[in-house]
Amino acid sequence: MNIIDDKIGIHKLVQMLAEEHLIPVFGAGFSRGAAAAGGTVPDGKTANNMMKDIINQCADFIISKETLEDKSFNETSKLFNQLNQRGILKGRYKEFFRKNFTEVELDKVKTAFLDIPWPYALTLNVDDAIERTRAFEAILPYLDADNKNTHGKVVYKLHGDAAFE
């Protein structure tokens, strides 16, 4: 690994940006804590606990609180989706996504960061924060990206979108 001087590093980053060789990848920390339709965007641990609470309220006859307690975020979200598909969550699934991951408002610093002339972006987030700034148009994993008529930069939403959950 080469260690380079700060000035050289900044110059290389600017050059890569100008040549459209830098692609941002946004994770949960980018929108965490931002205002949403029904509160704020939760971090992964909080979202996991929120899903567990809903499961405990709606499906305690299927899985015990003790069994659910040790489930990871991925295990909980998979179960949450399965219970929703079986009609057990009684609308709480959509409410969870609507309240916590839609109508997300980013602060000025994050919005300015999105205004950098990125060729495109990737996000692991299901919230609508990035596309609500109008800096990017969303491409969803379950829709045909080749048929999308975009007018600007796109953000590929690798884990889906709260509005379609």
Image: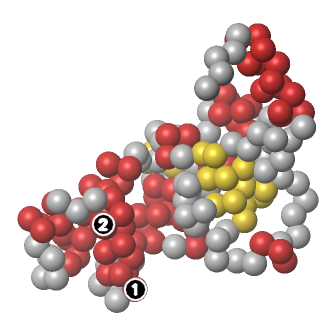
Q: Position of residue 139 (x, y in %)?
A: 72, 65
Q: Quick check: 143 above or below 113?
A: below
Helix, strand or loop under label 1: helix
Amino acid bearing label 2? Thr
Q: Position of residue 156 (x, y in %)?
A: 69, 60
Amino acid bearing label 1? Gln
Asked whether, in this view, residue 124 is left or right of residue 49, the answer is: right
Mark found first going from the N terminus, 2 or 1 = 2
Give the number of the mark in front: 2 or 1.
2
Q: Residue at left 9%, top 65%?
A: 66
Tag shown at residue 85: 1
Asked whether, in this view, residue 49 is left or right of residue 91, the answer is: left
The total number of labels drawn is 2
Tag shown at residue 76: 2
Toward which corner of the image does residue 155 lie, by quadrant? bottom right
Do we see residue 28 in this rendering?
Answer: yes
Q: Residue at left 36%, top 67%?
A: 77
Tag shown at residue 6: none
State the residue lying farthest toward the front: 1
